[in-house]
Every structure is written in structure tokens, then in C-alpha cells.
Amino acid sequence: MEINAQIALTVFMGVLLVAVAAWLTRIEDWRSYSSTAGGVVSQGERSEYIEQEKPAGLIRWLTTVDHKDIGILYGIYGLTAFAVGGLMVVLMRVELATPSTTLVGPALYNSLMTSHGITMLFLFGTPIIAAFSNYLIPLIIGADDMAFPRINAIAFWLLPPSALMIWAGFFAGPLGLGFEAPQTAWTLYTPLSTGSAGGSLDPAGGAGIDLMLLGLHLSGVAATMGAINFIATIFTQRDENVTWANLDIFSWTILTQSGLILFAFPLLGSALLMLLADRNFGTSFFLADGGNLLWQHLFWFFGHPEVYILVLPMMGIVSYVLPRFAGRKLFGFKFVVYSTLAIGVLSFGVWAHHMFATGMDPRLRASFMAVSMAIAIPSAVKTFNWITTLWNGRIRLTTPMLFCIGFVSNFIIGGVTGVFLASIPVDLVLHDTYYVVGHFHYIVMGAIAFAGFAGIYYWFPLVTGRMYQATLGKAHFWLSFIGTNITFFAMILLGYGGMPRRYATYLPQFTSLNVIATVGAMILFVGQIIFVWNLVNSWYAGKRVESGDPWDLKRDGVHTVEWQWFDRKIETAITDGGEEEQNAVTDGGEPIDKSENN
Amino acid sequence: MATKIFDKDTILDLTVNFVPLGILAVFIGIFVFADPWGFDLRASLPMYLIMFSMVISLGILTYISGKAIAGDEKKAEVYSQGQAFLDGAEPIDPHGHGENSEETDEHESKTDPENEEH
Ligand code: HEM
Ligand SMILES: [Cu+2]
């Protein structure tokens, strides 16, 4: 068994290395990337150089260095991971409909839980943000492409192997390779993750853990490459009119996020390698006295910034999209910019609020509480700015706008529960209960995923040239909003009741709230099926967008440059102009304008 | 106009980051004066280090970004986000937010008729 696992691992890594080496040799001229990014084209006139170079068919997608194509690839990748992670959690919630084990045993439950968390954070969250930033930032800041288009492509192509390694354990079991899916939870706490008898024999997943560590490492490398690229792009490739004073809020959040990635991910990479060495090469970073606490410090020094890596760009999307449908500028634009930067800094001083219950020195603990309280302020400032933007605005409840408002609503609950957790005495009661699960899901599902949906609907016409079905979009919103609130509010109550997290079974007194949470999850699930169907169907057969301003933004003076780019694109595509004024396919724009303004 | 970057308006914009700085200062004050757990270098040093490093780095980043943003405001026209090179976009008053909502409305109505013709 052990030999099998070792062989599988070796062969897998060997094939990977050879593939990478072979591929690298095919690129002769490393410096030629500058040719695509060199010519500074002002006033948003983008050279279509890259456009003409594209081959057809599959080869195009495998070889593309165009930021828009790479953005689409990231998007498809992220949504695929979202589906995988979502199906995993559907199984788990079905299991949790009854107190005892019925469908899924404890070992499989733990594997599903581990992979669900890692998939959603690393394979859905980070890539779906990269989808928006790759596609849009060069358009919005008036750059020709990313500063390093080829690095951009490499960063994306590291992700599919990363996913395969993270999920490898699920295939290994049925194939008889002798190792299983990891059961360590996404936090990979030692000593569980070090394995009682070295790498491949431990009960928590064997070589599956090693592969997952390598996969995570690879995804970290990808994220770091992307971050460097965005920093370089935003600093050096802006149109001359885009000064720091009028850089848009989405680019600001991506810039801050990239800074966070630059400091957080390399540290995760080092910690992962130390763990790998402990498991396989006889080192004892985490085996000596204090090793377990060391792991937690290293992990959370990365882990807390990671949650802001995910939420900041999504706040950027909401700050960018929400004003479009409120018919006015974002209220207090610069407050939002400065508080984004403040969150970026402070997120590196709060990590041990995940470790209040470890028995660390009370003085040290108190300082992390202080910084955690301070970081709540910039988040609250943003929330007030969004709400004030809505105040007296000409609100149009289109699907993206509904998701933005849902984001704000869910973020308030997620944020307030977070501030309670940041208070040491409260946390000592609620730590490791379902309250924590409720807290962070209000943010990761209720806010991060919602902002992702808002962005997908808002820019769907820009990317595909077609409009989605508005009714289905709204059904998706309401099912998601109701499902999220039922599921995760029930979890908050379960946490107050004292139900611990990360178990496949529970005491009978928690049954009714668990059933409610499962029902909520099923509502969410139905919503997401509608979403996928709407997306796929509309991409192939949706109504073509004929106007360059499908959201009717010009009317309120909130038109933006990426739609101007789109307008030019369809103008060159459509030979017979003329009928562009009808705006036939605006999602609810027209009828809602005329009727109620809620 | 171009003489002073950190004028009253810019300071007002930066107040948003003074609040977390203030909260940290209050906590530091409480820990210094109430001193509930006594002083022990091994624990107290990292404790103050965490808080002071946050105060200092937030202060520095706020200063640098304030300088970059306010400096560019004075050097070039300011546009609403996403409109910097939009055809026919009108520059905005960078300090037209918040304090004076009338001003904001004025800008909106000014751009409205312009857009009708499209
Ligand atoms: C208002 C600011 C926030 C504060 C003060 C806060 C506070 C906390 C605290 C103290 C915990 C630890 C609870 C425990 O394990 O006992 C926690 C857990 C968590 N928070 Fe937050 N939070 C905030 C915002 C966020 C945001 C924006 C995100 C996501 C983008 C997030 C994601 C998480 C996650 C994923 C966990 C659980 C990690 C785990 O143990 O698996 N939080 N939060
Ligand atoms: Cu945290």
C-alpha cells in the first residue's frame, strides 16, 4: 500500500515536471512579451494587435495571452470549482439532516468538508476575482493588456494541475492507489496533519495530504504571479488621464489585494513546505514543543489576510456596480479608497483572533482583540457609504443591483457577528461552534459569492454580447438570498446552542435547526442550478445586445469606459447601424424605471 | 492651489483612517494605565509591537496614499470613477462629496441633458 502511494506520487510529480520543462523549452524568447504591452495607446484606443494573432479553436484557448481570454478562462475555472465545492456541500448537508450517520460516513464527511473549504477559497474565490480583474482592469485603466501577458497565462495554467492535486485523494481511493482524500480541514492543524507515523501512513489522508499541500503551493505561486502582474499593470500601464485621483475603486481594491497576496501567500508556501518536510523528510518544525502553536501562527498570518484577499475586490465590484443602478456617484468615494487601504494594513495584525482559545498569553491576546476592533471601522465605513449611495438615488432593481443590495445586507450580519467573535470573552464561548461557521458563511457565501454574481450579471453583455434571461436572474437572486439567510442564520442559532463544528453527527436536540439549515441549502442549490442553466443557455442563445449601453447608464451620467470600449466593438462588428436606439434587451431597466422605485 | 497637498479637504478625507488609529490609541492607553496582567517583557513586548506596528504602518500608508491622491487631484482634472477617458465626461469637484449634497446634484443635472442627445 505504502509503496503504491509513493510510486503514484513520484510518477505524478515526474510527469508534471517533464511537462512543465517541455513546455518551457518551447518558449524561446522570454523577453518578447514586452512587444504586446509596449506601445502606449492613449485615450482608450486599444491596439488590436493581439486580436489578429489569435489562432482558431481549442489552440486559441490553450495559447492565448490576451487578458480578456484569460479572464474568461479564470471565470470558467472558478465556476467549475464552485459547482464541485457546491455539490460536495450538498452531500454534507443531506447527511446533516439527521443526527446520526446515514448517507456519508465520518471519514468521507471529513474529506468532503476539507475539500469543500479549500475548493471554495482557493479554486473558486481567488480565480473568480482574477476573472473580473483580468478582463476588466486593462479596459478600465486604459492599458493595452496586462504588463506581463505571458506570466498572466502561466499563472492561470498552474491552476488546473493544482486542482487535480487537491482533489487527487478522491480518485485515489476508487483507483486503489492506497491513499485517501485529506481529512485535515482547510486549516491543516498539526498534529493531525503531520500524521502520527510520518507521511503516508497517517489516518487523515496519507499521500492525499502531500498532494494537497503541493496543489495548494502551486495555487499560491499562481496567485503571487497574478498579484505581481496586477501591481505592475496598475502602476505602469494606466492611461495618462487615469491619475491616482481618479483610479476606479475596483482597481484600488485589486491593487490592495495584490499587496496582501504578495505578503501572505509566500508565507503560506513556506509553511506548507515545512509541513511537507515534517511529513516526509524527518524534520521537526511542528513536532517539537510549541510546534502546534507555531503552525497556527504561520497559518493564520496567511489565513486572515486571505479572507480580505477574497472580500476586498468583491467590495470593489459592489462599490463600482451599485452606484450605476442608484443613478449617482459612489458616496464618499475617497473614504472607500482610504478604508480599503486601512483594511489592507490592519489585516496583518489580527491573525491570532483565530487562536484566542489556544491558551496564549492574555497580554498578546488582548492586542489582537484591539486590532480586530479597529479593523471593523473601515468595513463599517464602506457599508455606510453603500447605504448612503442608495439614499435618494434613482434605484433600478436589476439583477446585478439586487445582488449588490443582498451583498450589503449579508455583509452587515457577517460583519457584526465577526466583531462579536473578535471580543475575547464572547469568542471563548463561541469558538469552534456553528456560530463561527454562520459568521464566515454570511461573508463568503452571502457577500463574496453575491458580489461575484452581481459582477457576472452586470458584465455578462460586455463579455458575451448577449443578455441573460432577467426573470431567471431574479429567481436566482431570491432563491440565493432566502437560502443563504435560512441556512446560515440557523447555523448562528446552532452555535448559540453550543453545537460544535466539523462533525458528521450531532446530538438530537439540534435536529430541527439542522433540518432548517438543510432546507435552506436545498433552496440555495435550486437557485444555483437556475444560475448555471441561465448562464449557459444565454451564452449560446441569449438575445443579442444591440446597444453599447445596455444598462442605460448614460441617462444618469454614470456611463464608464469599459462600456465605451464595448460600444466601439459592436459598432465595428455590426455593419448596419441604425436600429441601435431601441434598447430592447435591458434587464428590467425600462419597465422598472417607469414603475415603482422601491 | 498647488502649494499645499494636505489642506483641510484632504485631511477631512483622511479622517476615515484616523478612527482606527484612535481606537488603537485608546486600547494602548487602557493597557498601559490599567495594566491588568502586569508587565513581562516576553509577552508585553510583542503585545505593544503588534499594536504600534499597526499604528505606524497604517499612518505611513495613509500618508503616502493621501499624498498620491491629493497630489494628482491638484495636478490634473478629476473624473468620476471609470470616466477618466470617457468621451464627453465632465470633470468633477473632488471634494463635492458628503458635506455638500447640493453640489453633487448640480453636477448630475449638468451632465444629464448632455447625455440625452446620444
Ligand atoms: C468585521 C471584520 C471581521 C472580524 C472582526 C472577524 C472576526 C473573526 C473571528 C474572531 C474569527 C474566529 C472565530 C473562532 O474561530 O472562534 C473569525 C473567523 C472567520 N472569519 Fe471573520 N471576521 C471579520 C470579517 C471576516 C471577513 C471579511 C471574512 C471573509 C472574507 C471572514 C472570514 C472568516 C473565516 C473564514 C473564519 C473561520 C476560519 C476557520 O476557523 O475556519 N471574516 N472571524
Ligand atoms: Cu480573521
Image (cartoon, grey):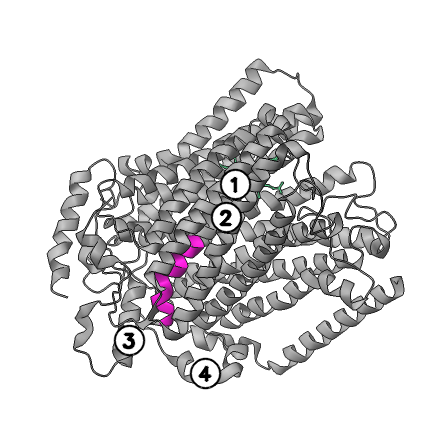
Q: Identify the mark nearer the N-term, 1 or 4.
A: 4
- Residue corresponding to mark 3: A570
The reply to whether the C-beta atoms of the residues labelled 1 and 3 are less than 8 Å apart is no
| Front label number (4 vs 3) | 3
Q: Secondary structure at mark 1?
A: helix
Q: Secondary structure at mark 4?
A: loop
- Image x and y of residue A243, in percent: 32, 56
The reply to whether the C-beta atoms of the residues labelled 2 and 4 are less than 8 Å apart is no
Q: Residues within 10 Å of mark 4 (few under 14, many from 20)?
A: some
Rounded to the nearest angstrom, the CA distance separating label 1 from label 4 is 46 Å
Q: Chain of mark 3?
A: A
State which region is magenta: A451-464
Q: Secondary structure at mark 2?
A: helix
Asked where in the image residue A38 lies, by quadrant, the reply is bottom left
Q: Identify the mark nearer the N-term, 2 or 4.
A: 4
Q: Main secondary structure of the magenta part?
A: helix
- Residue corresponding to mark 2: A445
Q: Is residue A457 magenta?
A: yes
- Image x and y of residue A22, in percent: 68, 80
Give the amino acid type for the residue marked by disc 3 in the picture: Ile
Quadrant assignment for the N terminus of chain A? bottom right
| Front label number (2 vs 4) | 2
Q: Is residue A195 above or below residue A153?
A: above
- Residue corresponding to mark 4: A54
